[in-house]
Amino acid sequence: MKTLTGLLAAVLLFAFTSPKNPQTFVSHYENVLGTSMELKILASSPEESAKAETAVLQEISRLSGILSGYDPSSEFSRWVATTDKPVHISTDLYDVLSLFDQWRNRTDGALDASAEAVTRCWKEAAKKGRVPTEEELSAAVAEVRQTHWALNPVGHTATHLGTAPLMLNSFTKSYIIKHASDVALAAAKVDAIVVNIGGDLLVSGRQTEDILVSDPRADAENDVPLDRIRVSNRAVATSGNYRRGELIQGKWYSHIVDPRTGQPADNILSATVVAPSATDAGALATAFNVMRPEESEKLAESMPGVDYLILTRDGRTVESTGWKRLETEKTSKPQSADNELLISLSITLQQGFAKRPYVAVWVEDENHAPVRTISVWHGPDRYLPELKSWYLKYRDRYYTDNTFSASITSATRSAGKYSLKWDGKDDHGNAVAPGKYIVKIEAAREHGTYQLMRQEIQWDGSAQKYTLAGNAEISDATMECTQK
């Protein structure tokens, strides 16, 4: 009898203490490492999700204070200011410097912290409306060829050598993502976490994530992706020449440079890498923009678990033998429209890590009937009704449409800067009739303000451009009707 009573008590105790079914909690931040961040946390309660989110933010802040080359007070910046002097440095800085040594060797110099010398050379020339001279490029490449530091594993010291400007770009963001994910999983009872900073992401825990690979030839947030993949416990990184660079005398030059030659890397439009290691994915994505595809293939084959998709300047795709296994059903390219509306908007940036407001962008006809949801950005579903106008008309579609939930891997863009497109079709894919339409941009920030922007457009194939007045949440927005 006692055994039965004890067993019953144990069953009741389990029933009342067993964890709830986990939910996915989504948050978006701006001003994180110079770009945007999306967090997806699978947890049984909002409280555990909040613990994990706090841990992520704290770890990013800690590592940024060590590794940033843009913050003069960071440990890296203070170390760079020294010369020919062994300095005891933190484990994180030592590890990252050591990784740069390894990747410089692995890529035959395609990855180098002193690529900043070449980058600055191009930026200075661009300010003068010209490309760098041969003498200027030769001087920059000579700096790259210097020995930049010496590491001592016994004393855990680094000695800064040479005069080349240094910047810990390439895979450092991925290094931070990995550490932030690990800290979050240790700090809270969560099942999984997806940390996506500027298009580089890591999926950790019991989660399989759908990921859209941005097409560099059509890279608006809602453009049809180049591909769609599904991964679990893997890192994904994308690097490309299409969002950052210099426009000189009408020609675009990539911000990614070959430090060995001083020339921008212009043969590759985009490289996406999937790897077990976040730093490997980040390093390879950048290196594959600089290296020839056959060199990239050889390097990837030497690293177990690495897959990639490379898009060349002439439109050719080069992929690993295992890439097809990652693909889900491909999104078919819609029939090309003759006209399109390009919407560019900037989120008003706040100091520090700031949550992005909820934003909905959609089209109505002149009678205010809904025509097309262009995009909707959100976090916890309970706050969606704050997007009053959009939610009233689209709540049913949102709850049955999973296109809002996939992660996006892309080249990094600046914090708060977004572009969207409307192809002149309704929610069912049918072309709309010429006439007057109203484009609405609605923004609502948790513990912030509510804003609604409206712009009437004439959809008739003519070229038009509109500039909307900014507000507390959207600092500026433009709309441009163009013919393809």
Image: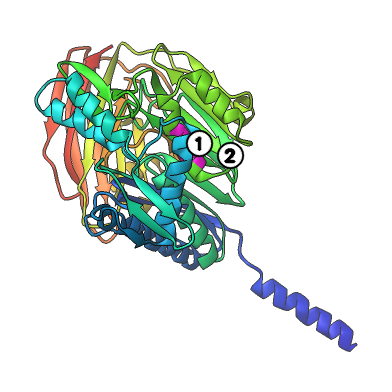
| Residue 399 shows in the view | no
Residue 62 rendering spot, x and y as whole percentages: 36, 62
Q: What residue is rendered at 42% in x and 29% in y?
A: 214
Q: Is residue 445 left or right of residue 199?
A: left
Q: Amino acid at mark 2?
A: Val
Q: Reply yes or no: does residue 437 show up in magenta.
A: no
Please say if 133 is above or below 398: above
The scheme the figure's colours follow is rainbow
Helix, strand or loop status at disc 2? strand
Of mark 1 and mark 2, the one earlier in the sequence is 1
Check the image and report above or below for 264 versus 476.
above
Assess disc 1: are there few (<14), some (14-19) or many (≥20) residues with their C-alpha within 10 Å of its C-alpha: many
Identify the amino acid type marked 1: Ile
Q: Which residue is mark 2?
A: 231
- Which residue is most to the left? 128
- The answer to which of 3 and 233 lies nearer the viewer is 233
Majority secondary structure of magenta residues: helix
Q: Are marks 1 and 2 in contact (CB under 8 Å)?
A: yes
Q: Residue furthest front?
A: 84
Q: Element at badge 1?
A: strand
Residue situated in front as seen by the camera: 242 or 63 = 63
Q: Quadrant of residue 66?
A: bottom left
- Is 283 magenta? The answer is yes
Quarter in which the N terminus is drawn: bottom right
- Nearer the observer, 51 or 264: 264
The residue pinned by badge 1 equals: 211
Span of residues in magenta: 280-285
- Which quarter of the figure has residue 467? top left
